[in-house]
Structures are given as C-alpha cells and as structure tokens.
Image (cartoon, rainbow, N blue to C red):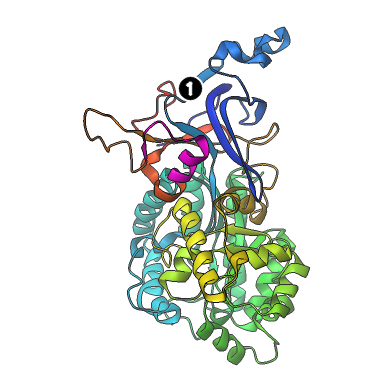
Amino acid sequence: MAASTPIPTIYLGAIVHSTSLTTLEICPNAAIGVDSSGMIAFIEKENVSTISDVQFLQNPQNQTTWSHARIITLHGHGFFFPGFIDTHNHAPQHPNTGLFGKTTLLDWLQTYTFPMEASFSDLARAKRIYQNFVGRTLSHGTTTCAYYATIHVPATNLLADICLQRGQRALVGRVCMDSELSPEDYRDASVSSSVADSVASIAYIRSIDEAGAIVRPIVTPRFAPSCTSECLRAMGAVAKRHQVFVQTHISENKSEVELVKTLFPLSRDYAHVYDSHGILGERTILAHAVHLTPQERATILARKAKISHCPASNTAITSGCCPVRSLLDEGHTIGLGTDVSGGFSPSILENVRQAIWVSRHLSLQTGKEADKLSTEEALYLATRGGAKVVGLEGKVGGFEVGMEWDAQMVKLGEVDEAEDRFESGPVDIFGWESWSEMVEKWVYSGDDRNTVAVWVRGRLVHRTGRFEGSGEV
C-alpha cells in the first residue's frame, strides 16, 4: 500500500517503549497526539479511557487544532510500540532467505549471494524483489532500515524510490567491491568507476529527498576482502566529502579475520584496516563484530563507530556469539540487524529473541551470568539503540513529545472459551496476564500477524484486516 498523508491524530490505548537500556515503560491507558507533520505533540500516560479523558483537549487554545483530529483507539489486548530499526540488511538477497544450508560465510557468498546480486542488472527483476521486500519488512514493524543494494546504480536508485514511495525510512547504499576476490562479472571495473557510481547514487537519492527525511544515501564498501586498499581509501574520502554514513562488515567469522590479515599485512588488525583508510568514524555502522580483540574494541569506541548485532545470521552461518553485553558495558552503541539473507528472517522481533538466545548460549560457554541480555535490553537495541546507530537518536525509537510517530500497533489474541481461533496470531492471552507478561508473550511468541498497523512520521504505511482505524487508507 502507498503511504497515506498524515493528519492530526490522537491514539488511545496502551503504550510500551524503552526509556533506558534496562527500563521498559508500560502505560495501559494513555493518549498520544500526533500533529500533521508526524510529530508527537502531547502525551498523557494515565487514566485515559476515552477521548473525553484527554486533559490536553480541555484547554480552549488546543481545541481549534485538534477538534477535527482522527481518533484511533486500540481495543482489546494490545499496545502501541515504537517501530523497529534494522541496522543491517541486504535487500537484494531476499530471495535467498533460508538458503544458507551447510555453508559458512565465504562459501555462502560465492554460492548464493554474488550470483543473486549480479542478476540485478535486470531492472524488472530488481523491482519485483525490492517491492516485495520493502513491503515484507514493513509488515514486521520495521520503520527504518539500513539497506545494502548491489553495484548497479539504476537498481540502487530504484530501491530508494520504492522506500520513499512506501514511506519507509531507509539508508540505501550502492555496494562497492573491486578486488579480485569478487566475481569477475560482479565487481567494479576500477576505483574511479566505483567512486563515480557511488557519487551518482548519492546525488540521485538526495535529489528525491533533499532533506533526507525518509531516504538517505550511505557509502557501502562491502567488506575489506572485497575492496582494494585504494578503493577503501576512496570510499572513506567520498563519505567525508559528501557527509554521509558508511556501512560495512567487520570480524564476522574467524576465517574472514584470517583472510583480512593476509590481504592487509601492514595493518595490525581488522579495525585498523578501516581506521587507516578513513572508514571509521561516528557515522560508521559495523555489522557483526563477533571476534573483535580488546584493541579493536578500543579503536571502535574511540572513533565512536557503531555496531550492528546480527544474532540470527551469526548463528545460521556459524560465525559465533557476539559478546554484546560486555560491549554495552564498555560503552559501545549497538543496534540489531536482520542481515537478510545470512539471517533467516526479515523480522527484528525475531532478532530480539535471537539476541537473547545468543547471549544465553554465550553465558553457558563462559559461565558468566553477566553475559545474558534481558528482554528489556534486547527491545532497547531494537528501537532506541538502533536509532543511535543510524543517526536518528531523539527523533525515533521511543515516545516523547517532539519525537516523530514511527510506531506499530500490536494486537494479541484473546482465547475464546467456545472455540479455537488462531487467525489473530500466535500469542494467546487468557486475561489473567499482567501487562509485563503480555509484552513478554509477544516478544517470545509473536510475529508479523500481531503487527496490525505501522506508521512512519505519522503516515500509515502498513495495515492488515485487523486494524480498526478504517478511516485511514
């Protein structure tokens, strides 16, 4: 569906969001007013059952603006939750989701990834896949996504067009890869062509969204083994000159780390490769970071670079267990990534679960209880943590006056005593659960069937038949 034009709207119902890394605020009877720009104008967190209970509207000065506002009430068991932020996703790999098989990273790239991405020279094929995938991610409540595209400028620009049309916030990057380790039929012809194509895509994306309100360009050197030293240095310069974010991979698995040592013998470690080529900085997103040394962790922290934790992918391709809890303790900024198609699901909610499971497996290995992530911490990474990673801190990821309304309506199933009814999704609510227990049931059992509506900047960008705000189309 195309995104709707926002009008002043008041949302009534329970709201749930992270207020800190360890605190999840749950307000069962709340009201949030969102103005026509998509910004939260007021919040009342207690004792709101109907629109007549909203104290903000009792002020005559507010009645003029809000007297004709749309009212959306969340009935039954459910809540409004911030939109998810996916900090690492390979959009062209969507058709390969679930096909990692028995391969490890480097074999998987050659067997599945590069052939699929190379086929995006066919723009009709790219359109079919990208349209489907942007819709798919929105259906899972993902309101912001950092996308890797392919080396093709037209297909990369097409992905940006689709995100803008659908209303999904996105960082869209043309992939840069010029080394001999890349397939001969799928690599940049030269460093100069890589620079020219990257700049062309940056210029196009800025031409369709000059302010970067929805879609922004991002420089995307695939990872160190795919790029020559000259290409890495050039991409660092492009990012600095055009003031854009950079995304790449680091220390995903041990064989990759060893390969980087061979390819860049003058660098002391993987992080130093990026640092010495001008890639690391506060606008850098590093995916995976599973096998970082203490020195690398210190370098990344000093440069204020950000980390995208991709737990489902790290398990699927047997890359390892990223020590997220200790990275957080050191002060690293971390969000979650699906890493489709190394990851088997486009759902950040699934990766919330996987992040918790991975931390518990790590705890089993180390014997340290402190390695475990809590439910609250994982939800923070999926929202406010991700917002920090993609440069949207204070704008999205939570519900506060002045923030933009990037949100999902979550509805849970109510058990009917008369018959079994499962069309409302996999979460069964019996009525005796506390609010925190209902949220936990959603975290550990929920899926896209529970996400019945999604908004970005106040615009409805996804809905299902269970959404009762029928005035929005």
330 magenta-colored: no
Percent across and percent down for residue 445 are 39, 48
Q: Is residue 398 left or right of residue 360?
A: right
Question: Residue shown at 48%/30% (left/top)?
Answer: 4
Q: SS at mark 1?
A: strand
Percent across and percent down for residue 207 are 61, 48
Which picture quadrant has residue 6? top right
Question: Residue shown at 72%/66% (left/top)?
Answer: 330
Percent across and percent down for residue 340 are 43, 62
Q: Is residue 107 visible?
A: yes
Quadrant housing the C terminus: top left
Q: Is residue 154 visible?
A: no
Task: Bin the neighbour count of mark 1 within 10 Å (Cα to Cα): few under 14, some 14-19, many 20 and up.
Answer: some
Badge count: 1
Q: Amino acid at mark 1?
A: Thr
Q: Residue furthest right?
A: 302
Residue 339's place in the image compared with 422, above or below, is below
Q: Is residue 131 left or right of residue 368?
A: left
Q: Which residue is mark 1?
A: 73
Residue 323's place in the image compared with 427, above or below, is below
Quadrant housing the N terminus: top left
Magenta stretch, residue numbers: 428-442
- Front-lying residue, 422 or 244: 422
Residue 267's place in the image compared with 406, above or below, is below
Q: Residue furthest top?
A: 60
Which picture quadrant has residue 174? bottom right
- Front-lying residue, 235 or 289: 289
Question: Residue shown at 56%/22% (left/top)?
Answer: 9
Percent across and percent down for residue 399 are 63, 36
- Front-lying residue, 246 or 183: 246
441 magenta-colored: yes
